[in-house]
Image (cartoon, rainbow, N blue to C red):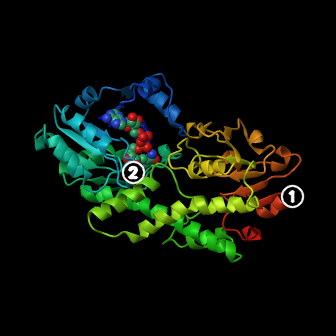
Amino acid sequence: MKLCMIGTGYVGLVSGVCFADLGNNVVCVDRDKEKINSLKKGLIPIYEPGLEELVLKNYKNKRLNFSTNLHDSVKKSDIIFICVGTPTKKGGRGADLSQIYNVAKQIGKSINKFKIIINKSTVPVTTGDEIEKIILKKNKKSKFSIVSNPEFLREGEAIRDFIYPDRVVVGTNDIKSNKIIKNLYSPLISKGTLYLNTSRRAAELIKYASNAFLATKITFINELANLCEKTNINIEDISIGMGLDKRIGGRFLRAGPAYGGSCFPKDTKAIINTADRFKTNLSVIKSVIKSNENRSNLLLNRISKLLNNRIKNKKISFLGVTFKANTDDMRDSSSLAMIPALCKKGAKVSYYDPTGSKSEFKKYKNVYFNQNIKDALTKKDLIIIHTEWNDFKSINFKSYIKGKKPIIFDMRNIYSHVKMKQQGFKYFGIGRWINKLI
Ligand code: NAD
């Protein structure tokens, strides 16, 4: 099939290259000329394990192409995927749908034969109806079909998630479009993926509901971790004990920093905004957002206590700053709340991240990038393990740190506090009784 992905970001590029690998002809379109030129030279704009090999392979065999020409790319394709960003509106809570509507207008001007237009971006309920209205301005209803097919891939595991998803959700009442899309996904269905056909609006809501639920799970265990610290209980025992119940499941039940990333913060806010529009109170999700927003402050207070409330001139080092491992995505990472706050209090903050230095911190005088783990550990007062990269999972602290030992605050509970104590470190985790000592 001839597919056109509009928006070559995490979702558009990953799903585009995976569809190409499954034997389709795919053109990935973006308005960002630099991005498209880089991709044509084989340079991948994002960090995602396994992506580079797959892009190079499919570009070489000509099943994958890149373009800035939306008009021509739409004309030549049978199925168009909209994969542009839907960030939070500036100064508001709702999703900014300007990129979606802008693309819809352009598609409307480019339809030359029947097209299936699939929205993969995360959008509020009824956005599909709006896209349809926009395209109807220039085209007859018989010339196109608007479908919702939300994407559930996770950054860092995106290729695996795309090829082996738990489910493919397709929102359409159009039998013809459903048949074609089911056929497109047949290589995944034949390997056991569940294909769920719903109404368009239901598919739109399934995506937000899923993200809000996962955000709730994380927030729930984070709050319980606070209780564990005061009651001589290890939060990991709670996570395992709860997770073994098949009705609950153990994933997304590990305590740590506030959730972040390009999806949970914006999608929880957007679903609240949609519910408000329809005069419905989603009080659980509202309190999840509030609790998560408070979490970085709570951890900042903990940091302050660890340093006896003397933060000025303290050398604090972050291991990892991205919102999770295996991605370079900094969007809404909790490090963006914590590092500037520590800087403001006069700390000298450095960080090391396997995906390199981050433009987000360039404007702060007291923040600098360490080139490697060794530098990040040397001559520090406090080391914070912020992101669970494999690189940080078996550090021999003793071999790196000579002289005065820093405090280690492990926000991912990677290490055993007994072993760290034996090595002479003041080591603290999340939701562990040891924290009571402070
Ligand atoms: P992104 O910001 O990485 O990529 C979006 C791309 O769209 C950008 O490259 C931008 O230049 C391009 N674009 C915008 N307007 C355009 C236009 N008119 N023509 C051509 N290109 C245009 O975004 P993303 O992370 O891939 O997310 C896309 C959507 O998918 C969002 O709604 C997001 O919520 C959803 N989603 C994201 C993830 C994820 O892990 N990132 C997972 C599931 C769903």
Q: Which residue is mark 1?
A: 424
Circle 1: element type: loop
- Circle 1 packing at 10 Å, graded few (<14), some (14-19), many (20+), is few
**How far apart are labels 2 and 1 at the CA level?**
48 Å
The image quarter in which residue 85 lies: top left
- Circle 2 packing at 10 Å, graded few (<14), some (14-19), many (20+), is few
Q: Which residue is mark 2?
A: 91
Residue 144 in picture, x, y percent from top left? 17, 41
The type of residue carrying mark 1 is Gly
Q: Residue at x 57, y 62 (%)?
A: 295
Quadrant of ligand 1: it is top left
2 or 1: mark nearer the eye: 2
The image quarter in which residue 47 lies: top right
* Between 364 and 436, the one nearer to me in the picture: 364
Task: Pick the quarter of the image with the N terminus.
Answer: top left
Q: Earlier in the sequence, mark 2 or mark 1?
A: 2
Quick check: 374 left or right of 90?
A: right
Quick check: 396 left or right of 60?
A: right
Circle count? 2
The type of residue carrying mark 2 is Gly
Q: Is residue 170 visible?
A: yes
Q: Is residue 177 visible?
A: no
Task: Pick the quarter of the image with the C terminus.
Answer: bottom right
Residue 122 in picture, x, y percent from top left? 36, 50
